[in-house]
Image: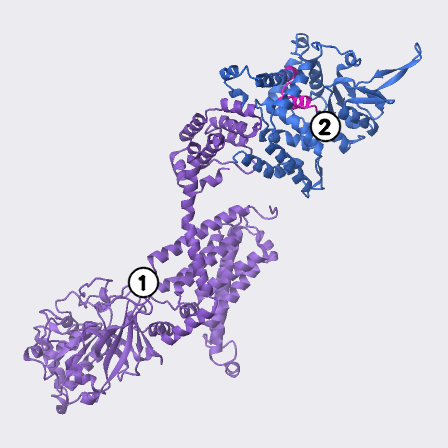
Chain colours: A blue, B purple
Amino acid sequence: MSLAQMPSTTAEAMSDTPTTAIAQSLPSARAVMRRLIDAVRTEVMGRDEVIELCVIALVADGHVLLEDFPGSGKTTLAKTLGEAIVDTQTPEPEAGVTSMPEISAFRRIQFTPDLLPSDVTGVPIFDPNDNSFHFRRGPLFAHVVLADEINRTSPKVQSAMLEAMGEKQITVDDTTYPLGELFFVIATQNPLDLAGTYPLPIPQLDRFLFKLKMDPIERDAELQVLNAHSPSSAKTRKAVPRISRTELLEARSTLAEMVEISPAIKTALVDISRALRSDPRVLQGNSTRSMVLLLPALQAAAALDDRDYVSAADIERLLPRVLGHRLVLAPAAGDCHTIICEVMAQPMEQLARSTLR
Amino acid sequence: MNTNTPQNWTEPSSRGQQGARLMVIAFAAWLMSLPLTIASGSVGVIVGTVAALFLIDSPRLRRRLQELRVAATVLAALLCALLLTLAGQLLARALRGGFGFELVGQQLINAGFDPLTPYALGEFIAYATLAAATLGLLRLTAQRSSAGQIGESLFVACAVVLTFAAHRNGMIDRPFLLGDFALIRGYDPAYLLMALGVAGLLVIAAVNLREASLVRRLYHLGMLSAACLLLVVFVQRVGLPLPELTNDLGLTAARGSEAPPDNPFQDSSNDPKDKAAPVAVVVFHDDYTPPDGSYYFRESAYSQFNGTRIDYATRADMDTDLLTGFDAQARAELGHATNPIAGAPRQSVRTTIGTLVPHRSLFGLDTPTAYRPIANPNATRFRTTYEASSAVPLFELEALLGREAGSANWSAEVREEYLKLPNDPRYHTLADSLTGQLNPAFSDDPFARAWVIKQYLDENGIYSLKNAHAAELDPAASFLFGDLTGYCVHFAFSAVYLYRSIGIPARVGVGYSVPASNRAGGSSLLIQAIHGHAWPEVYFEGLGWVIIDPAPQQTLVDMSTDPQDNLQQLLGDMLRDDASLDEFLAARAESEFDLMRLTRQALNLLLLAFAAAPMSGYAIKLQRRLAPRLGSSHARYRSGFRATLDRLADSGLSREFGESREAFAQRCGNCAPTMMTLTRAHLGAALSRKDNAAAAARADVLAPDWRSLENAVNDELRKAVPLWRRLLGALNPFSWLAAR
């Protein structure tokens, strides 16, 4: 049953039942996502699909790896996304979490080969005034982090990212510093300029929910970008709509609770994973974690599409982006996307048929 | 798939496919060659076919041929075919010494082989080259384009159909190897041929079918086999074709109708379409060889003058020897004839006769004395089967001298009837002048006078199937006093009129005349359409009616036919219906595992399934369509959606494998935009939570109006899809299979 079809009179009639609060919170969660997407769309043009997927990843508590060329708007995207999320509306500032105000909305790290882990995480600095060390937070302490050209840095730095991305905390000198609940990394890498790079190891790649390829934007959108970026219009930029972090976190929990993932969907996911692992063209299949990470993303995508259930369309939309960077293919096995589509066909057929049973 | 091959080229087949195709085509070529040549020629055809197909399918030559253009290839192949055939024929002729010189020394041939060997060798070479050239060309075109493969299928079909076509004219022995095999086991060779043809066609189609997916290939094969099965069913329902009616001399008649005989002088009535077509088979139970070299089978006679010509007798006391049916007993008049002791040199011969085409009436070996019906051993082949007892003449012609013409038992009126002729004095004048030349010693002898007239016709008559007399009032006079060109009816009538003009009672006998040599030493005799005959006969006291048949020395038509020894033997065996053979076969059938019977049973089951399938298809379709109205409400989201999917499938829209429901609904958007809404409603019901009671209650309350959604889709479909497409879908009993 779709939410769009819900007759308003019926919804009002049901308002005294306890389910109403949750039922109404799903549209509000969807509204939060919509607002966030609209906020980014005012700044980044012609990238609607990428924006939606980024927001889905953000809501689904995942990270995104963008594969693109310089100057394609990824910084703008990450920056706008970070700026759209504000904590001004945070109702109760928790005394215990002293680090909260010190986490900025958006940080950008340009990865270079000579970067050190401490440059990213932060470092304890000796304060001669009180003869003690104070931890100086690195750029990772932000809600949205743009990790530019992540494959240019050494594996040591890359692995420092691992803990942050996986567990939302940073440990320096036996002291663990928690990161924000909304810790979101947008990493980029250049698909062609491979000289002197350190390709991301598989476990690192597994931390990213999506790997997105950004195709060149359309002609009209590109024209729009040029028009919007004239120096005069830069001044008269209208304020982007803001979303509070609390709203976002509520939306996240609402989605997890309210959007139904039918057993048939889960069966299909497991079947696809198993089929991929047994396919001779695939040397290493996707991890179970990838499927676990995928579930909230599916829920977010379904909610974005006005549904309170996950359907095959969500799998079709998200699965290639989730699996693309996780599979290790045999030499000369062909195109990863083609293989995924072929392997998906059978479980998806089963899924489609299951609705008639 | 294969980048080296041009697009329109068919892909190379596997070894197994090549082998299967080779076998089927070689079989078809062999079948086709059988009526054309001797055994060595048939072997040559097989060898030539195998060689050509093997060469052209070999990878090396295939690559060479690829580089040529289509037109060039076909031209070259045609030229090759022509040259090869020509060379083969020339070599064969040279070997046979056809050019006045011998390729191989005559001495060597004489020393090494018997004279038949060069002939057999020549046939072998000629047919091997012919087959290699023709079938090589076919294979080449088939390789060139997928359309060319139709040629191969057509060839196989043609080979079987041509062989089959001979059966239509009663030549059920063709080819003898198959026909004999089938008939011995009690099966109709036509079905065997049909089965072989269908199987061959299916194999060729299976080999040549190059569909991307196995399912599509199976589908096409299934359709083809369904068509073949329909053909088999059709033949089983309608029956096999009968030999065409030959209707010469009014002997044969249309089935079930007693049509009056046509004017025997009409050309068309004496122009059988297939002169070799078998009309009846006779099995002799007693040994008998006619003294004059021909077996005469009398069916009736023209004896009574009707004003213009002599016709069938209407008086009961005329032609009392002619039997009209099974009820008629042997006539008293023939009492002495059937009894050899009475002085008449006649012998009693018992025969079994099976007619293959409907006849006007029964006939028997001259002179039939009794007919007795017997059980038809093969109802699909024989129209009527009966036993005929005959008193056959044994006397030499000299024995007829000095006998009185006419019977003492005849009344004066009957005798007068046998002497009536057209009022034309020329008959008497001619007969008188002919008999006047007789030796005075015999000038009064009836037989001698008759014989002179016969000899006159023998020497001056010209036998021809075409004549200019049919339209005359008295065709016999026109013939006799005109160009003397005509066929047996003209000769017979002329002779009878001449005899009657000089007081010899005579009539025209009608029936069949078969050369004794046709029996070829066996006990059965095949009567063919060409054997229909009419002849003059004269009654001699104490002997009965004696045939005095003019045999013109000049003839414009070839009345000879190829000996059909195999068919004659086959039909004879069928008619004889040997009880001991039956017992033998029955005993063997009991003891042996009867593959044919099992096959027939399996085929029947298959037929049943074939007929039941559409019925069950419609039943399932109806059930699925009605389910939303009849089914329970909690399954409403499923049944209604399924019914809608069925409707879409009827309109040619169905979900592809692996396609999600939303994607399908999107695809249907052009025809039925509401399908998206319906799909989402369905998915919502199917995929959202059902375990939670509160949620279920909510779902019930919020349930969309399924009926209106489905009706909306239906209306949209009705507007968007043409009527014929929907009708076609509605008629298809299996369209619901596509609705997934």
Span of residues in magenta: A38-61
Farthest bottom residue in view: B441
Q: Check disc 2 and give the amino acid type.
A: Phe
Farthest top residue in view: A236
Q: Quadrant of residue A301?
A: top right
> CA–CA distance between discs 1 and 2?
82 Å
Q: Secondary structure at mark 2?
A: strand
Is residue B155 visible to the viewer in this orientation of the structure?
no
Residue B492 placement, left or right of A250:
left
Residue A88 placement, left or right of B337:
right
The majority secondary structure of the magenta stretch comes to helix
Q: Which residue is mark 1?
A: B242
For mark 2, does the 10 Å Cα neighbourhood hold few (<14), some (14 to 19), or many (20 or more) residues?
many
x%, y% of residue B336? 17, 85
Residue B564 placement, left or right of B364:
right
Query: Eyeballing the image, is B491 above or below B470?
Result: below
x%, y% of residue B144? 53, 51
For mark 1, does the 10 Å Cα neighbourhood hold few (<14), some (14 to 19), or many (20 or more) residues?
some
Q: Secondary structure at mark 1?
A: loop
Q: Quadrant of residue B186?
A: bottom left
* Residue A53 is a magenta residue: yes
Q: Which residue is mark 2?
A: A208
Check the residue under mark 1 and report the chain it is in: B
Residue at x 33%, y 72% (from the top left corner)? B575
Could you say which is closer to the camera, residue A295 or residue B242? A295
Could you say which is closer to the camera, residue A127 or residue B547? A127
Q: Check disc 1 and give the amino acid type.
A: Leu
Query: Eyeballing the image, is B106 above or below B208?
Result: below
Query: Eyeballing the image, is A116 above or below B482?
Result: above
Check the residue under mark 2 and report the chain it is in: A
